[in-house]
Image (cartoon, helix red, strand yellow):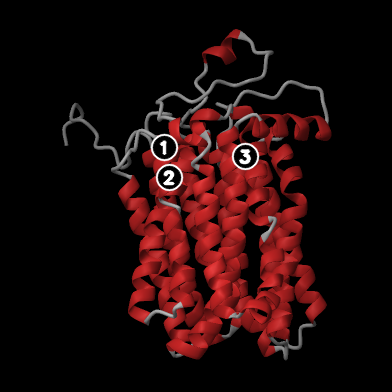
Amino acid sequence: MSPDAPVRRRRPDWAGRNYSLLTASAVVTNLGSHGALIAAAFAVLESGGDGGDVGLVAAARTLPLVVFLLIGGALADRLPRHRVMVAANALNCVSQGAFAVLVLAGDPQLWQMMLLTALGGTGHAFFSPAAEGMLMSSVTGEQASRAFAVFRMAMQGAALGGAALGGAMVAAIGPGWVLAADAAAFAVAGALRSFLDVSHIPARAPGGGMLSDLREGWQEFSSRPWLWGIVVQFSIANAVVGAADAVYGPLVARDHLGGAGPWGLALGFFGAGTVAGALLMTRWKPRRLLLWGTLCVFPLALPSAALAIPASVTVLCAVMFLTGVTLEVFGVSWMTALHQEIPEDKLSRVAAYDWFGSVAMVPLATALAGPAESAFGRSNALWGCATLVVVVTAAVLCVPDVRNLTRRTKPVARSAPERDSADAERPVGGLG
């Protein structure tokens, strides 16, 4: 080739070094983690535990996630985000590795599995706000929506593949080796994330402390009705949908659909729908981000309604696929809105409040699912889940900012008052 000939780029302009590293590492961890969720459940069952013990291990992961999320968001806005992410990956690697050793050695105790799972949840609590802030600072405003869509498509595809591969590996070689593979995945992902470049992110001014940081994050969060309104909406929607999926779905599948196989197939169709939805959002850029995103939350009520009937496996799979597509439209629109509206130096703290609201009520709803079934009947409880999703989604559409927030091409500038001229001229959404 002539030295004067143009060199063909292997990736688009918006997929810079940081974005590529973040996407690759997210694929690696999702492949491992979604298989490990299956492996952890089977590890509990094979050690002599029952469904209640599986629930305890799952709750042990969720509790520290709720407790430490806000602290994780404050740290990620004060420390270099990639260091927080790497440290969290290291904790996940060690905890999953120890879990694997216990299972492979034989006769793991319930308290040991709960402790190690809680360590994993702690790592996730510190990782998630840092990762979200890092991703949003790695793309330009003009191409943010497409970048987020491609990222989510890769992540959802890896989650779908990881669940399928993990289930097959648990059956073939046992849960211990799947947990070991997840530990290795965290090690690889942490190594990739250590190469992230944070030079484009202005340094935080000294002063203040943890409480001050949390207070600033709360002010940023609570001052935007569209932001806290949608977080409240999803705190309820995620809780009831989580209860339907975790508790009622398997029971309906056992009693009416033919067992775990059809339910797993339906979940697979949901995963395929999320990939298709992300692919759609690489092309579609709705002007009113949150209006279209929120309208696409209404189908989230359909799976609970289908289980309440109960519908056939074919209908359930179709409903799950549609729900995956529309939910991903919301997901990309939501990330784009956060990217363009939240100052870069507060992204992780706002993301922490978002995560906190999204998961805080899930353990309570899951715990109440059984009593609700006893009190009202399974079908009525599922119709209640569907109704709550519709009601809270309709309610959030009453917020004017949700209906009127429009797409822009430039993100909000850094909000800290003290900046030198070099910082003022540096774009927030650098490519690393």
**Relative to residue 115, is residue 125 drawn left or right?**
left
Look at label 3 and name its amino acid. Answer: Trp
Q: Is residue 358 visible?
A: yes
Counting other residues with Cα less than 10 Å from the Cα at mark 1, is it few (<14), some (14-19), or many (20 or more)? many
Q: Position of residue 333 (x, y in %)?
A: 43, 42
* Residue that carries the numbered disc 1 in the rendered image: 289
Q: Quadrant of residue 247?
A: bottom right
For marks 1 and 3 on the same chain, the one whose residue lies earlier in the sequence: 3
Q: Position of residue 394 (x, y in %)?
A: 49, 48
**Relative to residue 30, is residue 216 drawn left or right?**
right
* Residue that carries the numbered disc 3 in the rendered image: 228
Instruction: Verify CB contact (< 8 Å) between mark 2 and mark 1.
Output: yes
* Residue that carries the numbered disc 2 in the rendered image: 293
Q: CA distance from mark 3 to mark 2?
A: 15 Å
Q: Nearer the viewer, residue 280 or 139?
A: 280
Q: Secondary structure at mark 1?
A: helix
Instruction: Verify CB contact (< 8 Å) between mark 1 and mark 3.
Output: no
**Rendered view: 129 above or below 138:** below
Look at label 1 and name its amino acid. Answer: Leu
For marks 3 and 2 on the same chain, the one whose residue lies earlier in the sequence: 3
Count of numbered tags: 3
